[in-house]
Image (cartoon, rainbow, N blue to C red):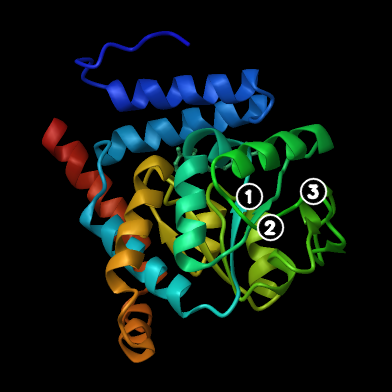
Amino acid sequence: MTEIPEDHPRYMSLVTREMLVKGVNDGITSMQGLIAQGRGEAFDYLIGEKTTGTAMRATKAAAAMLLLAERPVISVNGNTAALVSKEICELSKLIDAPVEVNLFHRTEERVGKIVKRLRSDGCITIYGDNPDRLIPGLSHDRAKASSEGIWAADVVLVPLEDGDRCEALIRMGKKVITIDLNPLSRTSRMATITIVDNIVRAIPNIHAFALEMKSMSPMELQEIVVEFSNAESLSRSLEDIAENLKKLQ
Ligand code: PTJ
């Protein structure tokens, strides 16, 4: 890993890059994952590399939806595992949600390595290495799911998701929460709740909200969810970008 000086103005962004390069070298992240990160970085730059108020409100609604869920599941791909494996395991324990490894560019070897990483980072129930169902309407390995995991879930947290699979999960009647820096992506538009933020900031924020709201009544949580509109939140995210750009002119 290249050592990044802590006083570099874009320290976090550069460290994130290094984590993904390490993910590729460790056989966890796909090469395509580096390209996906590049696109994410461009949008992160546009939103100012910080969590906006809009993203914070979406994060709060997501935490409320996860706390209300009967069978929440956290889907993990190669980028998520490289960037926030420990944080995912902490969230999984807090909200009592199993994790499922689900890859777009699936190889059994990579699934195995991600499962191993998640286990060593403290995840307890991990699905994905033995899928026994296929999500209807999806050709391709990304349709593979576990009957005890994503297949049976009512709410799925799927960071950095593929638009088609997000749509297929919604068609199955599931609620989908995604984290995607691109407010224009198909996934962002299809999801029930989109958090337009970097996954390295968003997962700890979901954890903090879930911890704070754990003692709220189902009615209070429901109110937070009902007040949230994904379409409005996405259009606010675009306004955030426009305002940030104006400041830079
Ligand atoms: O590990 P695999 O095989 O499942 O593959 C994972 C990737 C991410 C390569 C795959 O799902 C893919 O190709 O995704 P896309 O279609 O490129 O979508 C990724 C989305 O995530 C894009 O809209 C990016 O802007 C966004 N993104 C990238 N990095 C981050 C991000 N969003 C939040 N935080 C990031 N760090």
- How far apart are the two marked residues, 1 and 3, measured between alpha carbons? 20 Å
The residue wearing badge 1 is 162
The residue wearing badge 3 is 129
- The disc at residue 45 is none
- Residue that lies at the very extreme toward the bottom in this rendered image: 219
Residue 105, can we see it?
Answer: no
The residue wearing badge 2 is 165
177 and 235: which one is in front?
177
190 and 120: which one is in front?
120
Residue 66 is situated, as x and y percent measured from the top left of the image, at: 47, 71
CB under 8 Å between discs 2 and 1: yes
Q: Secondary structure at mark 3?
A: loop
Vertical relation: 239 (above or below) 156: above
Amino acid carrying mark 2 in the image: Arg
Amino acid carrying mark 3 in the image: Asp
Sequence-earlier tag: 1 or 3: 3
